[in-house]
């Protein structure tokens, strides 16, 4: 028994030390503490501490907590009961502070997560700047920074312009044509822009940070998504592949918008793969988002996201709208559609096809590609029977173009040809047809 007493004391001390160690939380180079709400096994960290340590964006509403890294957004419901927070992986409101499940946050924002000696560790994954391009559009000067992953950026100063790129460890040689330079900092890289006029603005696309300045007319933005691509051919009927047909339609729509005062962005302009999450993120910057697909047969189907399930960006925007100063409301309202907008847009597309003698149905479905949209977003599934000839693809593009213009309140394009001219004689699709 004499020998057991020191072992017992040692076990108690080790147990206390382990319990204290497990309460630590390492966030980047900072040390905080964790909570285990409801006596569960899920580690929670203080949201504001994590956001400050990693340079994340943070927004709190009465019912939601949002943390962001570039174009990625992690969304948490808020629970006041520890057991509920652990069970549903919600944010936990405790002693006037909000705590988030650390592992779930890391998963949603693509962060490093591990356990070191019993302590949860969360950190930024090092990012690499791949390319910088500069373009001038009217009076707007735009720099597009492309990375190997999403990056959070912040404006440090307007004059001279400086932008912080948090977590960026590698940068290429600065192209002389851009007039920029870089500075290595402890938290990442700082980019210096040449002198210019106007405040610096930042917005995000998948794996991109767009920095611009100068006055702009703020044309409405339409994002067109050609489904599939690369090794993913989609549906095939005979020699026709869905990926080729829908890309042909999307390129025709873009051409139709030439000179119409509308900014048109494509998620892909060639035969390449685009991750589904990246397509969905493109939708977050658009007033109108149309994802184009194809299926065997002649029927057209239009899908919108059911608002009863609440789109993330829409929910956040509508909560902010009531608290936004009047002078800034027009900017927010460009990207936050009024309730029912997507369903009305879908119905307008359905009626436009019906007017051309093409059966079209509209319905709601929780498609992931529509889940990040703030504007009117739909997925349109066209029939192979119409798309197998250039004339049919022209007609589909024309119908979709005019439906988008009608939604934006702009005059329709004059028809390039009558429906009877655009509809070719029917033939067995297995016999193939002209490629797009």
Image (spheres, rainbow, N blue to C red):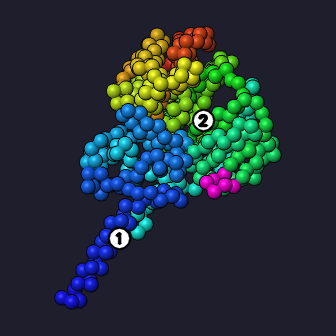
Tell whether 81 sits left or right of 208: left
Can the viewer see residue 228?
A: no
Query: Residue at point 60% right, 30% down?
Result: 265
**Residue for point 53% across, 54% down:** 124
- Regarding residue 200, the answer to whether it shows in the image is yes
Residue 187 magenta: yes
Q: Residues within 10 Å of mark 2 (few under 14, many from 20)?
A: some
* Residue at figure coordinates x 52%, y 48% from the top left: 52
Q: Which of 388 and 116 is in front in this view?
A: 116
User: For the residue labelled by badge 2, is the local secondary structure a helix, a strand or a loop?
Assistant: strand
Q: Is residue 198 left or right of residue 58?
A: right
Which residue matches tag 1? 17
Q: What stretch is highlighted in magenta?
A: 184-189
* Magenta stretch: includes residue 169: no
Where is residue 130 drawn, in percent x and y? 66, 50
Of the pair 356 and 147, the residue shown nearer to us: 147
In the rendered image, residue 362, in percent from the top left (x then y), is placed at 39, 21
Q: Which of marks 2 and 1 is in front?
A: 1
Which residue is disc 2 drawn over? 203
User: What kind of secondary structure does the magenta stretch mostly adopt?
Assistant: strand
């Amino acid at each position: 028994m004499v020998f057991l007493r020191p072992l017992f004391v040692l076990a108690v001390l080790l147990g206390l030390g382990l319990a204290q160690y497990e309460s630590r939380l390492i966030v980047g180079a900072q040390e905080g503490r964790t909570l285990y709400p409801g006596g569960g096994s899920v580690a929670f960290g203080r949201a504001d501490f994590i956001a400050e340590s990693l340079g994340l964006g943070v927004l709190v509403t009465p019912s939601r907590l949002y943390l962001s890294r570039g174009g990625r957004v992690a969304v948490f419901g808020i629970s006041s009961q520890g057991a509920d927070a652990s069970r549903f992986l919600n944010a936990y409101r405790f002693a006037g502070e909000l705590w988030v499940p650390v592992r779930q946050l890391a998963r949603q924002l693509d962060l490093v997560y591990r356990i070191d000696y019993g302590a949860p560790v969360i950190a930024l994954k090092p990012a690499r700047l791949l390319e910088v391009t500069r373009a001038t559009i009217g009076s707007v000067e735009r720099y597009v920074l492309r990375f190997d992953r999403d990056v959070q950026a912040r404006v440090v100063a307007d004059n001279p312009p400086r932008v912080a790129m948090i977590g960026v460890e590698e940068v290429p040689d600065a192209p002389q044509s851009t007039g920029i330079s870089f500075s290595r900092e402890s938290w990442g890289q700082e980019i210096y822009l040449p002198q210019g006029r106007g405040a610096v603005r930042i917005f995000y696309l998948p794996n991109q940070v767009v920095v611009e300045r100068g006055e702009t007319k703020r044309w409405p933005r339409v994002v067109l998504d050609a489904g599939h691509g690369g090794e993913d051919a989609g549906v095939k009927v005979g020699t026709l592949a869905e990926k080729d047909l829908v890309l042909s339609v999307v390129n025709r729509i873009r051409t139709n918008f030439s000179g119409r005062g509308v900014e048109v962005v494509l998620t892909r302009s060639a035969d390449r793969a685009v991750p589904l999450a990246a397509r969905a993120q493109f939708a977050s910057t658009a007033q109108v988002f149309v994802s184009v697909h194809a299926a065997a047969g002649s029927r057209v189907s239009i899908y919108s996201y059911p608002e009863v399930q609440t789109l993330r960006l829409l929910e956040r925007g509508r909560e902010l709208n009531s608290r936004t100063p009047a002078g800034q409301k027009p900017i927010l309202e460009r990207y936050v559609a009024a309730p029912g907008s997507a369903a009305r847009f879908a119905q307008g597309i359905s009626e436009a096809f019906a007017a051309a003698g093409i059966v079209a149905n509209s319905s709601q479905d929780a498609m992931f590609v529509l889940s990040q949209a703030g504007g009117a977003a739909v997925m349109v599934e066209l029939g192979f029977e119409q798309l197998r000839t250039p004339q049919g693809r022209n007609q589909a593009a024309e119908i979709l173009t005019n439906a988008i213009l009608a939604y934006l309140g702009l005059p329709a394009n004059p028809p390039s040809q009558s429906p009877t001219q655009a509809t070719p004689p029917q033939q067995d699709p297995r016999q193939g047809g002209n490629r797009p």
